Image (cartoon, grey):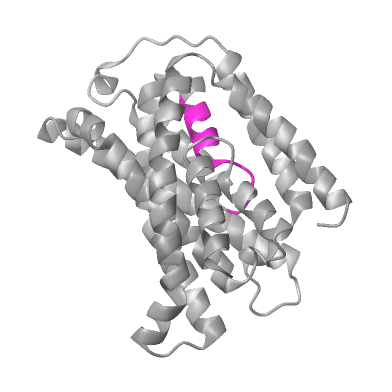
């Protein structure tokens, strides 16, 4: 994998991750078109490290908003902390359960089956893109109105809404193409959460989710490559670290665009894009990728 390949994938990841169009699907398709194996440990680690770059872009972009909303007072912080814990609990419960069930069902006779072995399947990515596209369309076209409760005043959502958003995030974990940001923001909108609040909370959950994902893929690479020393691991991770930097820059640009589209009422266009992308991915699968 050359530096040019890393930069291309980083830009694709950075631009797509923070838009509700599934960065993973875009990166997997790009890897296949460039003749790479998206299921290999180096490539899955690269993908997660690209997520790390976009995670820092999220922190940089949303910090002032989070500080005003979540850190304005100790009461606000306690509220969002509980909501984040509840959401992450349901993410882990549903996502972890689904991953374990899929690994057993898809690989019934394999002793060490891993969900990553399915990440290169375009025939699975296409329907996932289509489903999230439909969800985004419904959320974008539905006129929602809600009366904020006392619990919603400080953070813009309540604990029950946070739990549902976390549960939907769990559904996204095993499936490349089922956009995490698209599904969680759309869920928040359908539950009556203001679009800007749903966006803030969705990306706050992404920051929580990224470190465990990095640890999982780094450990997978260590086992696959039989890496024993810190220097060997650092060398193996160098392309991913470079990719994270480029994804950070691209992610900042994407976030500014996303916010404008959210507030301008054009959220549904992302749903249309996902449906078109699903058709393209299905065609690529049909022709042999």
Magenta segment: does it hold 212? no
Nearest the camera: 26 or 141? 26
**Which residues lie in the magenta part?**
174-188
Where residue 271 sits, quadrant-wise, is top right
Q: Which residue lies furthest to the right in this view?
A: 287
Nearest the camera: 120 or 78? 120
Where residue 129 sits, quadrant-wise, is top right
Classify residue 18 as left or right of residue 72. right
Residue 161 in percent (x, y) is at 41, 29
Classify residue 259 as left or right of residue 266. left
Q: Residue at x 51, y 77 (%)?
A: 221
- Does the rendering let one see residue 82? no
Q: Residue at x 32, y 14 (%)?
A: 148
- Does the rendering let one see residue 149? yes
Q: In this view, does 99 lie above or below 205?
A: below
Q: Which residue lies furthest to the front in this view?
A: 4
């Amino acid at each position: 994998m050359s530096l040019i390949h890393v930069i291309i994938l980083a830009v694709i990841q950075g631009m797509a991750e923070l838009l509700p169009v599934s960065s993973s699907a875009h990166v997997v398709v790009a890897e296949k078109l460039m003749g790479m194996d998206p299921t290999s440990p180096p490539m899955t680690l690269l993908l997660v490290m690209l997520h790390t770059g976009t995670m820092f872009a999220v922190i940089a972009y949303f910090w002032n908003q989070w500080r005003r909303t979540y850190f304005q007072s100790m009461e606000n912080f306690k509220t969002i902390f509980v909501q984040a814990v509840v959401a992450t609990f349901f993410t882990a419960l549903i996502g972890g359960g689904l991953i374990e069930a899929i690994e057993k069902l898809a690989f019934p006779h394999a002793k060490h089956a891993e969900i990553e072995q399915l990440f290169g399947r375009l025939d699975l990515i296409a329907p996932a893109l289509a489903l999230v596209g439909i969800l985004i369309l419904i959320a974008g076209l539905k006129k929602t109105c809600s009366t904020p409760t006392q619990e919603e005043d400080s953070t813009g959502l309540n604990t029950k809404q946070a739990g549902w958003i976390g549960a939907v995030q769990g559904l996204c974990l095993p499936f490349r193409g089922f956009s995490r940001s698209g599904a969680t923001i759309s869920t928040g909108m359908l539950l009556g959460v203001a679009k800007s609040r749903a966006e803030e909370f969705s990306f706050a959950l992404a920051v929580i989710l990224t470190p465990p994902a990095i640890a999982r893929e780094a450990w997978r690479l260590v086992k696959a490559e039989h890496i024993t020393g810190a220097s060997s691991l650092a060398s193996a991770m160098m392309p991913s670290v470079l990719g994270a930097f480029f994804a950070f820059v691209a992610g900042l640009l994407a976030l500014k665009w996303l916010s404008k589209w959210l507030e301008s009422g054009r959220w549904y266009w992302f749903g249309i894009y996902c449906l078109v992308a699903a058709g393209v991915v299905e065609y690529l699968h049909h022709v042999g990728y």
